[in-house]
Amino acid sequence: MSKKITFDYWADLYSNRTEFMFSSEIRDLLALSARPDIISFAGGLPEVRAQNFQKLEKYVKRTLKSDGDINIQYGCSDGYYPFKTKLIDVMRLEGIETVEEDIITTTGGQQALDLLAKIFINPGDTVITESPAYTGALNSFKSYEAKIIDIPVDENGIDISILEKKLKELEKKKIQIKFIYLVPNFSNPSGVTLSFDRRKKVLELAKKHRIIILEDNPYGMLRYEGKPIPTIKELDIRGDNRNVIYLSTLSKLLAPGFRIGWIVAPHPILEKISLGVQSTILCVSTFTQRIAYEYFSDPSWVDNIKRFKGIYSKRRDIMLKTLKGNLSSIASWSKPKGGFFIWLKLPDYLSTKEILADAVRNKVAYVPGSGFYPDERGLNEARLAFCTENTERIEKGIKILSKIVKEKIKLYKSFK
Ligand code: PMP
């Protein structure tokens, strides 16, 4: 959008809702990520260059050749059925046994979040999120005027004792929570993973207090070490399969440009979501779903995941090593076993927003922490994405960033 400031002739006509719609700092910083001179730890951009483009071309050609007229036509609001058969295979690898009728496809995971917010949240309704939480989810929930209660995470995910206390307190006040939003695997932004015991406990609490869990799992397949932990959805399926709405996306398994996500939920909820799809987009692109169908029909997609994991784990390792070599006595950070992100905590007298200006001047970008809290906390925290840059640039960028941080600390101490 143009940066020119213009008087808004229509300012009095917007809905109240727009007051609660915020731009994600990440989106704003993506412009920086596109500049080749900037080493970007900002956006979580997958390494799409590692895809086999010749194969992709083959899938596109096949899509146009076989039933081309159907594949560029409007499709079903619940998703392209043959593609859903492939999603069943994808989810089975994560331990989830489901059927096509339990799935609705969406335009990316982001639309899944928006649809779920749309069907559950009335202005003033309460939702619970982990803290820090994915900005895109916070922005979605806020745009439907939700009241967000955030519960801190430690290295094993959301703090169960604080959650339990909060739920009791809210129940006493007769406040019905609309849902608890969690990214249990290698969370965006914290990088932490919810332990098995806590997954069981969170589900137990959800059942006890009659609450829905939104389990957002874009990164589950990108595990670089340790054994996979059952999803909360899998645990729920083993029981009455009532509390968990599972959502995921192809953005990290295939490529974000396809804009395909999906939701698995109990049928009455799916019916409401389907109405939401009809009133917003009619249907997800049949064309991209059909190409994705071809992609997941070729068993080599699993090898692509292995290749992705090889690339990302090396990038994670170099970022962790360089942080250790340069900021050990000064800062702390999460040690993710997968995914895209490391969460950095600087001394509390430093502001990562202020440091960002210096960092960008020195050609390094990251996302300041405050955007991941509902109320602008996390001023001394930052999200570092290790997925985008190659290992040399990661090492260089972290060294530059560390130097700036050390200079700031020196300056601060000189005034004390
Ligand atoms: N959920 C989480 C936790 C994410 O990190 C993202 C994107 N980074 C999304 C949902 C949305 O992804 P998309 O719309 O690309 O599918």
Image (cartoon, rainbow, N blue to C red):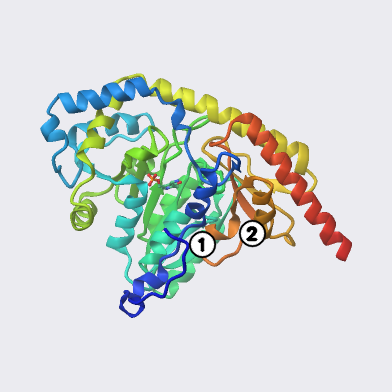
Closer-to-camera residue (228/386): 386
Secondary structure found at label 2: helix
Q: Quadrant of the C terminus?
A: bottom right
Residue drawn where x is 32% and y is 38% of the image: 258
Q: Nearer the viewer, residue 303 or 12?
A: 12
Q: Which quarter of the picture shows residue 93?
A: top left
Is label 1's Cβ within 8 Å of ligand 1?
no
| Residue in the image at 39% along x and 62% along y | 141
- Residue 150: which disc? 1
For disc 2, does the CB lie below 8 Å from ligand 1? no
Q: Amino acid at mark 2?
A: Lys
Quadrant in the picture for the N terminus: bottom left
Task: Using the rendered image of the protein, determine whether residue 205 is visible from the camera's viewpoint.
Answer: no
Q: Secondary structure at mark 1?
A: strand
Q: Quadrant of residue 56?
A: top left
Question: Few, some or many C-alpha atoms within 10 Å of disc 2 (few <14, some 14-19, many ≥20)?
Answer: some
Q: Nearer the viewer, mark 2 or mark 1?
A: 2
Dot 2 corresponds to which residue? 353
Q: Are marks 2 and 1 in contact (CB under 8 Å)?
A: no
Q: Position of residue 391 (x, y in %)?
A: 62, 30
Q: CA distance from mark 2 to mark 1?
A: 21 Å
**Visible residue check, residue 47:** yes
Tell whether 111 sits left or right of 224: left
Judge whether 194 appears above or below 167 on screen. Answer: above
Total marks drawn?
A: 2
